[in-house]
Every structure is written in C-alpha cells, then in structure tokens.
Image (tube, rainbow, N blue to C red):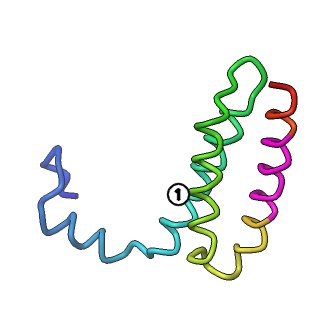
Amino acid sequence: MNESQAEPTPEEVVEELHKIQVGDVLLSSASMFASLAYGKLAPGAQDLEQARVAIDALRALLPLIPEEHRRDIQGVVANLQLAYADAAKSA
C-alpha cells in the first residue's frame, strides 16, 4: 500500500491476493468454524442447531484442509462431536 494513500490500489489488492494460499484460508475458516461451534456449545449460551451447522461445515472442509493439519482438525471435529452429544443429552 502506498504511504500517501489510505486505501490500497486495485493493483495492490490483486498483488496481495496472488500471495494468499487457498490452504491457509481453508485452515483459517476451519479454525473459525471450530471456535463458533465451541461457543455455541458453551453452557448458558447453547445453540445446538448453530453448533451442528458449524460442526457440519468443519467436517465438509476436512478433506480440503492441507494434509499436514488434517489430523489436528479431525481431532477437533471428534471433540466437538462429543461435546455436542453431551450438550444434547443435557438439553
């Protein structure tokens, strides 16, 4: 971004987009869905339907996550599914 400008030029935006790796965005999205799901399962603020949607979205992204991170995300999905089952039992 030019120091004299408050906003980047279209060319600068395109240049930055070329640097972004899709795998990084997928991993970031997976992290966001996991955080949302855990938040929706929190006692006192439970929203099981929204938690389920976030878990399903995370599961859908799983095959696309870069392989070096896939096992970690699979563990998160398993933990979320257990937390969801516990929450659903007590609801």
Q: Quadrant of the C terminus?
A: top right
Q: Quadrant of the N terminus?
A: bottom left
Measured along the vertical axis of the image, is residue 73 above or below residue 67?
A: above
The magenta segment: 75-85
The percent coordinates of residue 42 (x first, y second) are: 75, 28
Q: Which residue is mark 1?
A: 29
Left or right of 47, for residue 7: left
> Residue at coordinates 74% horizontally, 17% vertically from top-left?
44
| SS of the residue under disc 1 | helix
Q: Is residue 79 magenta?
A: yes
Of the residues shown, which amino acid type is indicated by label 1?
Ser
Characterize the magenta stretch by its predominant secondary structure. helix
The percent coordinates of residue 52 (x first, y second) are: 64, 45
Question: Where, by quadrant of the figure, is residue 39 drawn?
Answer: top right
Q: Nearer the viewer, residue 46 or 67?
A: 46
Measured along the vertical axis of the image, is residue 9 above or below residue 34?
A: below
> Residue at coordinates 57% horizontally, 67% vertically from top-left?
61
Left or right of 29, for residue 88: right
The percent coordinates of residue 85 (x first, y second) are: 83, 42
Q: Is residue 28 magenta?
A: no
